[in-house]
Amino acid sequence: MNRTTLSLIAGTAALAAVTGFATLNQPDATPADTAQAAAELPVERTSLLCPSPSTSDLAETSYTSFTPVTKGTDGDGTAELVAATAESAAATTDKTGDKATDKATDKTGDKASDKKKATKPVVAPKAPGTPAVGETSGGETPALLGTAGGKFAPGWTVQETTEVAAGSGRGLQGVTCTAPDTEFWFPGVSTVADRTDYVHLTNPDDSAAVADIELYGKDGALTTTVGEGITIPAHSSEPILLSTLTGEKQEDLTVHVNVRSGRVGAAVQALDEKLGGDWLAASTDPAGTQVIPGIPKDATAVRLIAYAPGDADADLKVQLASPSGLITPAGHETLHVKAGMTASVDLGDVTRGEAGSLVLTPTDRSVPVVAAVRVLRGKGAQQESAFITATAPVGTRASAAGNSAKGSTLSLTAPKGTAKVKVTASAGSGGGTAASQTYTVKGGTTQEVELPVPTGLKGTYALTVQPLTDTPVYASRTLTATTEGVPGFTIQTLPDDRGTVAVPEADEDVAVLQK
């Protein structure tokens, strides 16, 4: 087998390891035509995993699935979300401690019923370009395993949004369902008395996955043995209570999930007795510069948490990209992060009535870090919390599902230069016509844009963000809902949807395979 054939096989194997993959299926094309088509192909299959939304009997959860219309796809394809088959009773007993026996009894009592429930789709979209919605209620909703193929795969996104009327974690909780991967970083978790934080690990595959959970605090790694070698059975999900992994109580920790075998989806649910709760998504990969977009203009308190996973300390310049440009928060010009340790700082009401984004850059040499902020809105007993993690740029395109006519906000920031961005509001889940608008975001600023709304909107709609210039653009979407006077909110970042895959050396490799 020659070198060029090997390179195509290696490239295809690498693509299959991420959220989706592309195949080359044009044997009759000329080498030149094939090279042009293969340079950027739509993803043909992808997976998304949604964690179990809540243990509260008062929880009301909606799932919104959306695939933007993508050129180059054919007329075939499907997408669906089905319940994970079961949680492992043994693993739950070892890792979480409480209510494991009852869960084991509930989940093994009727295997036929469990299998039937696992195969019934919670959401089954009918066409790209139009959102599909499913709903559940109560506290026993399982994690969901999602697969999409054909025309539904490129850019597929699913939003999980939960309203909890009272109790720990009350308020609005939201998370973008994640693609399976082998490594995740979560700066901003806690093991203090008022917090109940779970890391949810969901395995979509036919064989068990094995993962390690490591905790890093202000003085370095926390001692834990039960966080090693956690088994997540096939087609199942495990919620791991972080306070059972260590006896240390610290307000700001960083969780590192490292998958030894297989792959999982991961998200952290952070529940507070007094300040509500929300999901903490994984930070983007460690890097010297990080952007945390879309801090609400009415934020009453912002806490920055950062971690340096390498062997060198990081010194970061802290700036706020405001609507008028980059500014340095008084008294918080820099943040020193020691190697292997978590650092945090209270920035107060740093946005001061205007939406903003944090931009972290190295003051000297570049040292990789991960970062997130915890945001509070409201005052006193009416406070609610949410998290924003550092994210990658929008890239070619990104989408956010689950928007309503009121209560949705989009923030765009372009730290390195002026950018033009096209924002499209899809048709509604119950009817309506898509609408688009183009915005200019000046360099170093954050713009909270007035969203286009579908004409004749019925139900929910999705937002698609497409940069029209080469300048990097970062984005986040905020959902708000007031329940019994509490200003509930949740924020999701919008990285590239990875709807297409570039195939390296396609012209040479395909030509060889056709001989």
Image (cartoon, rainbow, N blue to C red):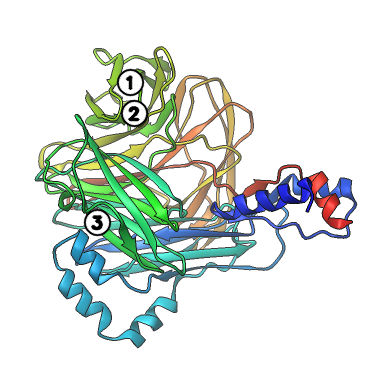
The spot of residue 414 in percent (x, y) is: 50, 26
**Image: 117 above or below 95:** below
Q: Nearer the viewer, residue 265 or 403?
A: 265
**Image: 458 above or below 314:** below
Which of the labelled discs sits on residue 313, or is there none? Answer: 1
Which residue type carries mark 3?
A: Ile
Residue shown at the point (36%, 62%) measured from the top left = 62
Which type of secondary structure does the marked residue at label 1 adopt?
loop
Which of the labelled discs sits on residue 506, or is there none? Answer: none
Residue under label 2: 308
The spot of residue 305 in percent (x, y) is: 27, 31
For the N terminus, give its image quadrant.
bottom right
Alpha carbons under labels 3 and 2: distance apart: 24 Å
Query: In which image quadrant can residue 345 be found?
Result: top left
For label 3, the crowd category at 10 Å Cα-Cα, with few meaning under 14, some 14 to 19 and many 20 or more, is many
Which residue type carries mark 2?
A: Ala
Q: Is residue 509 left or right of residue 154?
A: right
Q: Is residue 455 left or right of residue 161?
A: right
**First in sequence: mark 1 or mark 3?**
3
The spot of residue 118 in percent (x, y) is: 40, 76
Q: Nearer the viewer, residue 177 or 22?
A: 22
- Number of disc labels: 3
Contact? badges 2 and 1 (CB < 8 Å): yes
**Image: 244 above or below 312:** below
Alpha carbons under labels 1 and 3: distance apart: 30 Å
Contact? badges 1 and 3 (CB < 8 Å): no
Which type of secondary structure does the marked residue at label 2 adopt?
loop
Is any atom of residue 56 visible in this view? no
Residue under label 3: 240
Query: In which image quadrant can residue 373 be found?
Result: top left
The spot of residue 249 in percent (x, y) is: 11, 41
For the C terminus, give its image quadrant.
bottom right
